[in-house]
Amino acid sequence: MTINEQPPPASEQPSTAQDPATAPARPVALITGVGRSIGIGAGIARQLAASGWDIAFTYWTPYDRRMEWGAEDGAAASIARELEAAGARTAAIEADLTGPDAPIRIFDEAEQRLGPVTALVLSHAESVDSGILDTTVEAFDRHFAVNTRASWLLIREYGLRFRGEPGTGRIVALTSDHTVGNLPYGASKGALDRITLAAAHELAHLGVTANVVNPGPVDTGWMNDELRDALTQGTPLGRLGTPRDTAHLVDFLCSPQGQWVNGQLLKSNGGAAS
């Protein structure tokens, strides 16, 4: 694992009229899987930054590089600049979540650079299409290492470190109901659901809420034309989801107004047929 992204030089950071020493403290959100500017993770980061959060986020360029959409050069630095323009302090952390020590190191760096984490948003994923007959053991294990084990360890680390006021803590995990032809992804996301919903009860003594969000069909560059058309036709609203759609729900769940929503698997999918 490498954690090596550095914040932009001071000369590139936007100036603010308010003295940071007297500005009100912003809560810190740690968002995983913010590797591409058009991704859901980046959309969530933008929305939370606009709502007054400081943002630590993780990304892993080698994953994007081996996927068909490819890596986006300079994405982490570009996203960080956007968030800073919205008033957020940022910490971009490159992290390989296949390593079991990654969650501890991620939280260490996030806390060192921004302070204690109030909200944990899990939007990372290993997702390579394969079914029951053609999934390899190596692919199966990698999906569960990233989507399930790393998520559990991140939630555990959050629970061990959380010291916020009861009622302020938030955990939100993004899931999927896709299984056919996507066995390791769907199965590992199903396990993630159970871990997150358990956190709503096991972390009750901290006053932390934990919810799972299924964003439905969101085109972030991975769909072909045939799939895009089919999914659009299967959605009553006649369109696909956008990262902003998911971000609005996550923003609500992380807000004081979202406190009473807890231990839920929420479908934010425009009514798309399962």
Image (cartoon, rainbow, N blue to C red):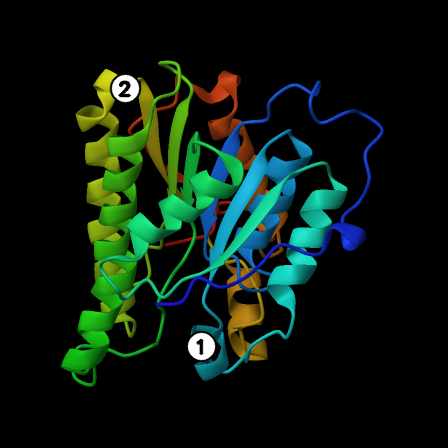
Residue at 68%, 46% (x, y): give it.
Answer: 83
| Residue 110 image point, x, y percent | 45, 44
Q: Amino acid at mark 2?
A: Leu
Residue sitting nearer the eye, 108 or 140: 108
Left of 191 or right of it: where is 9?
A: right
Furthest residue toward right: 17
Q: Tag on residue 206?
A: 2
Q: Tag on residue 197?
A: none
* Image position of 230 with respect to 237: above or below: below
Q: Amino acid at mark 1?
A: Pro
Left of 8 or right of it: where is 34?
A: left
Q: Secondary structure at mark 2?
A: helix
| Residue 30 image point, x, y percent | 46, 42
Q: How many marks?
A: 2
* Image position of 159 with respect to 164: above or below: below
Give the CA distance from mark 2 to mark 1.
Answer: 36 Å
Q: Which residue is mark 1?
A: 62
Residue at 26%, 32% (x, y): give it.
Answer: 159
| Residue 93 image point, x, y percent | 48, 57
Counting other residues with Cα less than 10 Å from the Cα at mark 1, is it few (<14), some (14-19), or many (20 or more)?
few
* Image position of 2 with respect to 264: above or below: below
